[in-house]
Amino acid sequence: MTATHRFRDCARYWRTPLLPGADLLTAEYRDHAFAPHWHDAYTIAVIVAGAECYRYRGEHYVAEAGSVPIINPGELHTGSKAVDDGWQYRVMYAPVDFIRELAADLAGKPQALPWFAPGVIRDADLATRLAHAHRLLEAGEDGLAAEAAMLDALSTLLVRYSQTCPVSARVATDDTRVALMQERLTGDLVEPVTLAEVAKAAGLSPFHAARLFTQSTGLPPHAWRNQVRLQRALAPLRAGSSVTDVAADSGFTDQSHFTRHFRRMFGVPPGQWQGTHR
């Protein structure tokens, strides 16, 4: 790829009734870097060209063209270019319930929540199926073919690579304390909260509370709270509320603050994201 063919920062989010509740993304990036964040859905990506690097579960990964990086729901990760030209990819943010039901259909009985081991899947056949399904869904010209391709691609992913999530080795007491702090942080997202108040909810000193919270979630309390704010902002944006109102109702100090954080997480400003979801 020559310098004249470098990717630019360009993204389009869209939806399809064939995958209810899912966000889909067609994008290319060169200069944009995603801040640590998570999604409530399975992030199922296929790299079309270039290469992306990302941090996930404490490790650094590089996903090149033809590979399939998968992120489990609620898992913290980043994203940026791994080569100077950037990367181009197609992504399905597949709802948890849809993937769970598909896994049960494949097995013929209820299944534990599917889980994918950290790392980049290098399976050319799977990548081809996912990219083909994504293109058909985006084109929207033949719903029957698109749905068949989507189910084929996601079924192939589950059959070949899904596992059961390993049991956490974390101490139950720590889990309880983190949960209490999270409850205090999310009780009212508009209300200012101090670290001392968060620590008090867990019966810890501010120092120990901040350390435990960051070790457990991967983010300090203030950054974690902003991620929750952003996730909860999606529904009112999709419903048509103004960006200004959503920013205020989500607890951000102003619209520019909200826009800056939103773009670092989703790769586009909230107004552009909203425009593709109406």
Image (tube, rainbow, N blue to C red):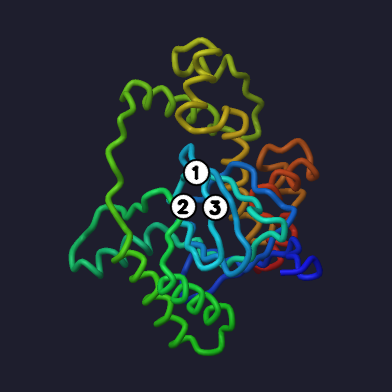
Mark closest to the chain's N terminus, 1 or 2: 1
Mark closest to the chain's N terminus, 3 or 1: 1
Mark closest to the chain's N terminus, 3 or 2: 3
* Residue 134 locus on image (x, y percent): 52, 75
Q: Secondary structure at mark 3?
A: strand
CA gap, disc 3 to disc 1? 11 Å
Q: Secondary structure at mark 2?
A: strand
Seen from the viewer's position, the closer of residues 244 and 109 is: 109
Asked whether the viewer can see residue 13, the reply is no
* Residue 12 locus on image (x, y percent): 67, 67
Q: Residue at coordinates 51% horizontally, 89% vertically from top-left?
A: 142
CA gap, disc 3 to disc 2? 13 Å
Mark number, residue 56? 1
Q: Is residue 162 left or right of residue 264?
A: left
* Residue 155 locus on image (x, y percent): 33, 70
User: Label 2: few (<14), some or many (≥20) within 10 Å?
Assistant: many
Q: How many marks can you see?
A: 3
Mark number, residue 62? 3
Seen from the viewer's position, the closer of residues 182 and 249 is: 182
> Between tags 3 and 2, which lies in front?
3
What quarter of the picture does the C terminus occupy? Answer: bottom right
> Between tags 1 and 2, which lies in front?
1
Q: Is residue 241 left or right of residue 103?
A: right
Query: What residue type is disc 2 on?
Result: Ile
Q: Residue at coordinates 56% horizontally, 84% vertically from top-left?
A: 140
Query: What residue type is disc 3 on?
Result: Val
Q: Which residue is mark 2?
A: 71
Q: Residue furthest top?
A: 205
CA gap, disc 1 to disc 2? 8 Å
Q: Is residue 193 above or below residue 26?
A: above
